[in-house]
Amino acid sequence: MTAATTATPTLVTSDKVVLLGAAVLTVLAGAADFGHWGSVTAFVVSAAAVCLLASVVGRSVEQLGDRFGPGATGVLQSALGNLPELFICIFSLKAGLVDLVRAALVGSILANLLLVLGVAFVVGGLRHGTQQLGSERARTIVVLMLLSVSAMAIPSLAHWLHTPAAAHETSFSVIVSVLLLALFAMSLPFSLRRSASDDVSQGDLPHEPPRWPVSLAVGLLAAAGVAAAFVSDWFVHALQPAMDALSVNQTFAGLVVVAIAGNAIENVVGVQLAARNESAYAFSVILNSPVQIALVLAPLLVLISQVFGLASLTLVLSPMLVVVLLLSVMLAAFIAFDAESTWIEGASLIVLYGIVATAFWWG
Amino acid sequence: MTAATTATPTLVTSDKVVLLGAAVLTVLAGAADFGHWGSVTAFVVSAAAVCLLASVVGRSVEQLGDRFGPGATGVLQSALGNLPELFICIFSLKAGLVDLVRAALVGSILANLLLVLGVAFVVGGLRHGTQQLGSERARTIVVLMLLSVSAMAIPSLAHWLHTPAAAHETSFSVIVSVLLLALFAMSLPFSLRRSASDDVSQGDLPHEPPRWPVSLAVGLLAAAGVAAAFVSDWFVHALQPAMDALSVNQTFAGLVVVAIAGNAIENVVGVQLAARNESAYAFSVILNSPVQIALVLAPLLVLISQVFGLASLTLVLSPMLVVVLLLSVMLAAFIAFDAESTWIEGASLIVLYGIVATAFWWG
Amino acid sequence: MTAATTATPTLVTSDKVVLLGAAVLTVLAGAADFGHWGSVTAFVVSAAAVCLLASVVGRSVEQLGDRFGPGATGVLQSALGNLPELFICIFSLKAGLVDLVRAALVGSILANLLLVLGVAFVVGGLRHGTQQLGSERARTIVVLMLLSVSAMAIPSLAHWLHTPAAAHETSFSVIVSVLLLALFAMSLPFSLRRSASDDVSQGDLPHEPPRWPVSLAVGLLAAAGVAAAFVSDWFVHALQPAMDALSVNQTFAGLVVVAIAGNAIENVVGVQLAARNESAYAFSVILNSPVQIALVLAPLLVLISQVFGLASLTLVLSPMLVVVLLLSVMLAAFIAFDAESTWIEGASLIVLYGIVATAFWWG
């Protein structure tokens, strides 16, 4: 993380603050882990470090991607944006926290579709009144989200509702994971082309040229990636004792804590866009995350857990998680088809998220 | 109910008929209760009295509200329109008929979304052909309805699908009820503003100026409210023996009988509007009722049952009730997004209501 | 099937090929059945014969219907298009394969809404880019589909979620079947009028005048109908040993094999239309089939099984079948409301179909 202290003219103040913060927090998180600080302190410090490293990854990808057009940025962000969450889930699986990982996957989707969307609607609605969601593009993403999340949900439905399939939980989950990843691979050219044409139509978006030299962006990306791997490990170390200290069960920790920490930066971006009245763009950013989780993160984790002999993760979620997942996805779809958002809709979404989270408080 | 006999020039003929009828039926319902008439007769008389008192309440609110603008009318109607149903549910809880109240809450929503909407589509469709549902406003109400009903359904889903939450049924229901009421309170300024602006856009609606003096409206409202409380008590007295005499189980009685009697006037208004080809207005009136039930009536009853030590009502509904509730809400949402109604859609809705009611006939 | 060899100037080459093929395969299927050929061979031959006979029925109906306007064609196709599937299901019930028939009913709907729609989107999307789905008409069909499939699903939901109703499975299914058929009867004038007006608005569709004399069309229809009855019997004969030989369970055979074979021609037509960029027409053809199955085929089979004392078929489907059915119908509805299709949506639909089919492979 020495790059963080290298002041070049290409780094603006906010870059420097983030890089410095990430470096400091990474060091602190390491100290907390090796120095056996209190579990809650260690947990909070490493969670903050994860958030800032996610921001460094995001900024590096943006600077890199700008040289290859918006399509490539989108694909790179798809591939690397979920990196911290991927690391946390892998280390959690290594620690045997399977329920936490399952809940975190669903929780990331819920946090996006209920909490972040809700906050974006409230912030945007209070500042700018009724906002348009740019239905055309949002609808296409929503349909893809519905289909990919439904596909991801079939192993759970089969497990709980069709007894013979329950005996083949692992092989079925592996098959579905391969199909979901294949679907993602097929969608790449689509994403590349789509993003490119969108950029033309959104030509009035404030778009700054790349400021960082390629070497700096690659270097920071590599450094942040490596740091994220270490910090994720420490985060998971601290998580279990912190959960015990705070009497939080595994499912709630995954559904709420890990889901929010792992997506913090994406979440903030979505809300900021809504606050700047770029509600259509905010909406498509927020909706895109569940597609990534269903098509990339979840299947990748299933395959990794099988191949590397970690605690076996399948796509079989608890009944409540599946139902809440499908319900949220459908509600988000109806909201997308409404094409307008108001702050009271946002408030309802936040309340709904709170109620769901409360249900899982008792674990 | 002496006000009913005071003939002032401000009362038109239909007012007089309704007031006279309400007064007579209230007296008859009391006589039936104290005179130990046959249970079915007592039940029918008190049910008719409830309907007419609901109409008196509705007319008083309309006359009152007109002085404060359409927003205030809407809010007043929200607050008082469900008054008779609230009384019936409270007395039913006092009598220990918890299953009846649960079914009545779901039944009111089903009756609106399937039966009344179906009849409105058939009547409107046969008279005027394909009707427009004024998608803009309908969609916003539909999204609010989806979110509030989903929030109301979470305690049931958690109870049946997430074992640890089942042990906290009461406290979870109380938390959710407080959140739903808070959401309603937050939505009040929204409703006030929305209704006001709608009125401007619907300026061509036949809108009569208030005819009643304020004192008469307030007096009638108070009188009808008090009478509704008594009649509801007698209605519940008669209900249980009448159910036994007719071999109707508690769930069916709540889902169909109480739900239709308690919403009779609202239902008639919705169908009348469709018949006059004001289909968009009819649709939003019909859709608004489920929002009121989810955000006000259901949580209020939960809190009242806990605070006043009545039979404990929670938001945990039977699995079939929850599924049918969520299904109906989603179907109504798809219909709202279609933005057009035909009589065959109406016929399908009525058939669907009949099938659901039949399923609960076996109790 | 001697008509197949009568070459008249009204038969174009494709007619001749289909008629000849149908005749040859019908004879072969009979030979396979009486000659006790290998079960898999007999099964494949009879399945192919069913497909071609379905094509003959379709062509005859089209030629006949053209004389009575497009409305009559639609109604005739509704009535006769599912003829081969009806025969297969009746003979399957006679052979006691109740699970197969239940799965075939759901499978036909899934095959249309996921597989055929998916292939149509991929073929159309790869050739013509983003396609429009002509939302107006598609939405009306989708709403009818949602309502009729929901109505059909209530007996299953009641059976699994509302214990008292489970004891009345047969009578409830009969009541629902009568209501669904009544709804179909009521929708006939609507379909007649709708199709007629649609034809005017779609006046630019390439529409050829009837080529066959009425006598030929009636004769071929009768011959193909009788042949279809025989071939269906042989198909069911061969099905069970073929299933055993291939280790396929009854549900999978119904859901995938029978569903695809029984709808082969309709399926091909839908894909061909999408390939010719008549995507809106393709979409409404594909969506119409589930309505027919819910309103006609399923209730008719229930009543036939009760009246003729075949193995008792009710509308109670296994939990997994109901959930997958409702999910698919809702996904199709969202796609219809999106009003645009892309090939990646098509690919997702195909993947989803594959995953569902896989779930039922373990039976």
Image (cartoon, coloured by chain):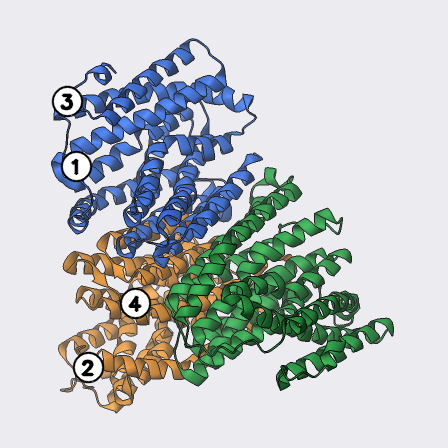
Chain colours: A orange, B blue, C green
Host chain of mark 2: A
Q: Look at the numbered disc 1 and give the secondary structure of its residue.
A: loop
SS for dot 2: helix
**Could you tell me if the residues under marks 4 and 3 are in contact, i.e. CB atoms within 8 Å?**
no
Residue at image mark 3: B9
Res. B102 visible in picture: yes
**B317 and A5: which one is in front?**
B317
Q: Which kind of residue does numbered mark 4 sit on?
A: Ser
Q: Check the residue under mark 4 and report the chain it is in.
A: A
Q: Position of residue C113 (x, y in %)?
A: 52, 66
* Local SS, label 4: helix
- Given the image, what chain letter belongs to the residue carrying mark 3? B
Q: Are marks 1 and 3 on the same chain?
A: yes
> Could you tell whether C139 is left or right of B22 in the image?
right
Q: Nearer the viewer, residue B116 or C4?
A: C4
Q: Amino acid at mark 2?
A: Thr
**Within-10-Å neighbours for mark 1: few <14, some 14–19, many 20+:** few
Residue of label 4: A135
Give the CA distance from mark 3 to mark 2: 86 Å
State left or right for residue B140 relative to residue C77.
left
Q: Position of residue C41 (x, y in %)?
A: 78, 77
Mark 3 surroundings within 10 Å by alpha-carbon count, few (fewer than 14), some (14 through 19), many (20 or more): few
Residue mark closest to the camera, 2 vs 1:
1
The residue that mark 2 highlights is A5
Asked if residue B87 shows in the view, the reply is no
Q: Mark 1 — residue? A: B208
Point out the frontmost of discs 4 and 1: 1
> Dividing the image into 4 quarters, which one contains the N terminus of chain A?
bottom left
Residue at 50% x, 76% y: name it.
Answer: C120
